[in-house]
Image (cartoon, coloured by chain):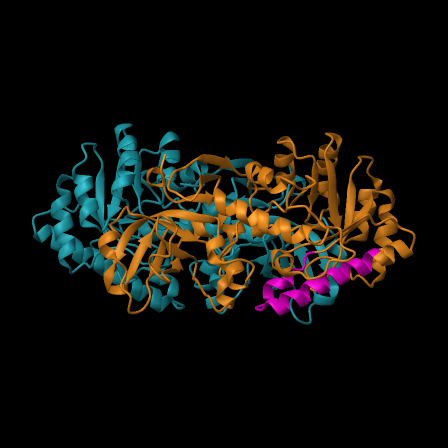
Chain colours: A orange, B cyan
Amino acid sequence: MQLEDLRTPCLVLDRGILKRNLERMSSAIHRHGVSLRPHLKTAKSAAVAEMAVAGEAGGITVSTLAEAEYFAERGFLDITIAAGTTPQKLERVEALANRGVRLNVITDDRDTASAIAAQRAHYKAFIEIDSGEARGGVDPFGEDLLEIGRTLGDKLKGVLTHAGHSYDCRTVDGIQRVAEQERNAVVTAARRLRDAGLACEVVSVGSTPTMSHVERMDGVTEARPGVYMFGDLFQAAIQSCTRDDIAVTVLASVIGRRPSHNQILLDAGALALSKDRSTASTDQDAGFGLVLDIDAKPAFGECIIEHAYQEHGAAVGEKNRPLPFDSLAVGTKVRVAPNHSCLTAAAHDRYYVVDGSREVIAQWDRINGW
Amino acid sequence: MQLEDLRTPCLVLDRGILKRNLERMSSAIHRHGVSLRPHLKTAKSAAVAEMAVAGEAGGITVSTLAEAEYFAERGFLDITIAAGTTPQKLERVEALANRGVRLNVITDDRDTASAIAAQRAHYKAFIEIDSGEARGGVDPFGEDLLEIGRTLGDKLKGVLTHAGHSYDCRTVDGIQRVAEQERNAVVTAARRLRDAGLACEVVSVGSTPTMSHVERMDGVTEARPGVYMFGDLFQAAIQSCTRDDIAVTVLASVIGRRPSHNQILLDAGALALSKDRSTASTDQDAGFGLVLDIDAKPAFGECIIEHAYQEHGAAVGEKNRPLPFDSLAVGTKVRVAPNHSCLTAAAHDRYYVVDGSREVIAQWDRINGW
């Protein structure tokens, strides 16, 4: 089967680019003597996870209970669920743990820590640390840290943070400063727990920008980046990768042409691409995605999706560079590079896998939902 | 089962509000002697479609081939697929037509019209008309209209437009002007086709804003609004409905609290809510959604999702009105009203149906994908 034969819109994954991205991050992390626990929130696919854990210890990170259940069923038995849990969610955690999955949850809440401690099932919990983003996590210098550590007791696994504010940086220098902030927060928290006589086996950090540029990881034992596997236009704009490193694209068909506006209409709109506009805050604003030709080459220059309607994407060519309308008949297939691959991929239920050509060499499933 | 028992995040649909919305639009359309062909792109659910066609002629509108196939399998046998088709997509159209579905496609392209005309299967095609949005459609005064009409021959069903630029209006007056532009465009196109000796049986318009306020529909035979069924914060902001008319909400759990920032963290982020920011262009900016209590009451004032991360929604209360943190423990359930219900609903595979209380009276499936 060739890309030309596929129904559109659909999600295309280039295995060669994926492999290169995996190897680059693996080297970057191992250079620091730290283990890599890849975050599968972007890929949500067992086939991708198998490639991502090759040469690693085998543990993975996920963002939802549905992902944890999906991966456990497919033989991944060492899983960290890296979004704050609740007492009500512990029933599903317990069920997974009782099936033999080595499971870690995270919390920054005293009551939830009590609920975790009260459960008999053998699983562990990280204390989530705020390293500057002010999203989730306790202050590494605060009293909650020690109180939650004591409450968790035998269930305490370590400390964990995500420096999501690295996404606000626009220079490598800035990202490196956030990486050091990230490291410092968890290392401080780990030291305070240990000084209080509490075990803190794992010290975990991770965001793709910080892990792409981090200079120093003393005291850190584990990294959990995710979007590095696929890359996207936003990660390229903030220098975590280049546009050539983007492994996922949406295959779309031209469904309309408007030469007077230098515009083509695609059958990939807000549902197939997502309404993510993260590149708007960078100097490489790509609208709702960058239109490439069927071979994923930038044949149309900066032809970007300016309007994303539910099922229509209106792509406009560069000023003074008319699109080649003669070769863009209705039905012509193009590929759209995403702003944010985590969100774009989640609109689709499978990957059509290629490896540098138009031949579809595999279909890989993926899990959505909760 | 009660809302308290559901896994979060998930999608809740209030049947009573839905019914009221359906009746309101039905009256508004019938007042003009025009038939209602509800657009199921928002609901994508056979159970909702059954309610929406009650008292109507029975025809429905959809936006994708996957929707057409889903509804055909469930006994809906009169379907307009209202997004521009391509020659490559006609194979699936033909297969549906050969199963006995009365099918209409739309096109604004001469080559696609030729491909449609060349097919033996009994289905029909609308010529898409641009009524001012400049997304899809031919100029009602242009030569393409007649050429495509002649090419379609026996397959010509009529003319169709969608005044999507009504979404740019902020006053009822403005919406009424767009409604008249919408009407005028298709009525003009229909007259020109008929003057050229071509049959033009159906004259079809439709957007929820225009159909909510239209004053005059002479010459129009059919209306195809969609989002009126569920409403959303954007439609409320542009006066297609009120906030009390919003029928779908996302049930979410509190997973973190940060009183210093008057902030709660929910397990509904960009994937569960979408990254739609349509209310940002209105005077009722609701971030990525408005947080209500579990009974869908506005108990927290203008508490809006300011940041939508992949799986986290950070909701911030009003200035000088601290959130009631004592009743927002981790695990507490709240409901989030969406900016754009079409996109939010598409993140979910089912509706948990309630009717004014917390009791879940049904689960209704929905179709996603293409």
Q: Where is residue A339 in the image (x, y as percent from the top left)?
A: 48, 57
Residue nearest the viewer, comparing B283 with A185? A185
Quarter of the figure that contains the C terminus of chain A? top right
Whether residue B347 is visible? no
Quarter of the figure that contains the N terminus of chain A? top left
Q: What stretch is highlighted in magenta?
A: A162-190
Left of A257 or right of it: where is B235? right
Residue drawn at the location 39% of the way across and 51% of the way down? A296
Residue nearest the viewer, comparing A4 with A257? A4
Left of A96 or right of it: where is B163? left
Which residue is the extreme one toward the top? Answer: B99
Q: Position of residue B125 (x, y in %)?
A: 22, 43
Left of A85 or right of it: where is A237? left
Q: Where is residue B186 in the image (x, y as percent from the top left)?
A: 21, 55
Q: How many labels does the image show?
A: 0
Left of B208 or right of it: where is B183? left
Q: Is residue B109 inside the magenta stretch?
A: no
